[in-house]
Amino acid sequence: MQEKQNDRLRLYVALVCALALLLIAALAFIWRQMERLSAARSRLEQTNRQLLVSNRIKEEYIGRFMKLCSVYIDRLDAYRRMVKKKISAGQTEELLQMVRSREVADAGLKELYVNFDSAFLSIFPDFIEQFNELLQPGEHIVPRKGELLTTELRIFALIRLGIDDSSQIAEFLRYSVNTIYNYRAKVKNKARISRDDFETRLMQIR
């Protein structure tokens, strides 16, 4: 009788142990699934944040681009009328002087960069502050009075927008590719973090 009770007890203990193991396995499985779901949710949230930033960039720059196009079309039309008038009046020498001057082109570029800077800072209002946090103390880049972005900041603003090819940056900013390389290297040498991590951290600026 005692032996049967012992056998039954051992059976119960074995069943309880088996159930406990199954429960532990089930909990471990559920935990792993929850971790995977949490990781997937984090990736989805990160993707959504990136999409929101991307959409803001597109909306801001497309709107400004369309406005600029309209302004430049009006200016070209006014310029065409002025050229026609001067040709009719025989003022060709004055026209040649205007064509040789870079004043109009320089003014147009200045306006383009002001529009770019303004649009960029409306999307990333804390860019300058967060960018300077990546640099060593005493090496911060601060725009002059009346200036939105310096050349260095504008280069890294373009990189933040996903334009990281130095030849494309050089074309937009009217510099040589070598000058852009030098600017990038000079700023990275001032970084308080690894040079290799600098642009990765730059892309995390919100």
Image (spheres, grey):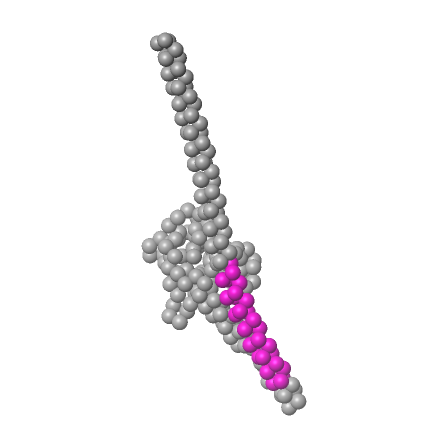
Which quadrant is the N terminus positioned in?
Answer: top left
Q: Quadrant of residue 2?
A: top left
Relative depth, front residue between 34 and 5:
5
Question: Relative to 20, does residue 85 appear above or below in the rendering?
Answer: below
Number of on-image labels = 0
**Residue 32's spot in the image, x, y percent?**
45, 36
* Helix, strand or loop for the magenta stretch, by majority: helix
Which quadrant is the C terminus positioned in?
Answer: bottom left
Q: Is residue 82 left or right of residue 28?
A: right
Residue in the picture at 39% in, 65% down: 143
Relative depth, front residue between 184 and 64:
64
In this view, which residue lies farthest toward the front? Answer: 1
* The residue stretch that appears in magenta: 54-83
In this view, which residue lies farthest toward the bottom? Answer: 89
Is residue 175 in view?
A: no
**Residue 45's spot in the image, x, y percent?**
46, 51
Residue in the picture at 39% in, 11% down: 4
Question: Relative to 103, does residue 153 appear above or below in the rendering?
Answer: above
Question: Relative to 99, does residue 36 appear above or below in the rendering?
Answer: above
Relative depth, front residue between 196 and 59:
59
**Residue 154's spot in the image, x, y percent?**
47, 62
Residue in the picture at 43% in, 61% down: 124
Question: Relative to 110, does residue 92 appear above or below in the rendering?
Answer: below
Residue in the picture at 49% in, 62% down: 56
Q: Is residue 74 magenta?
A: yes
**Residue 15's spot in the image, x, y percent?**
42, 21
Q: Is residue 126 magenta?
A: no
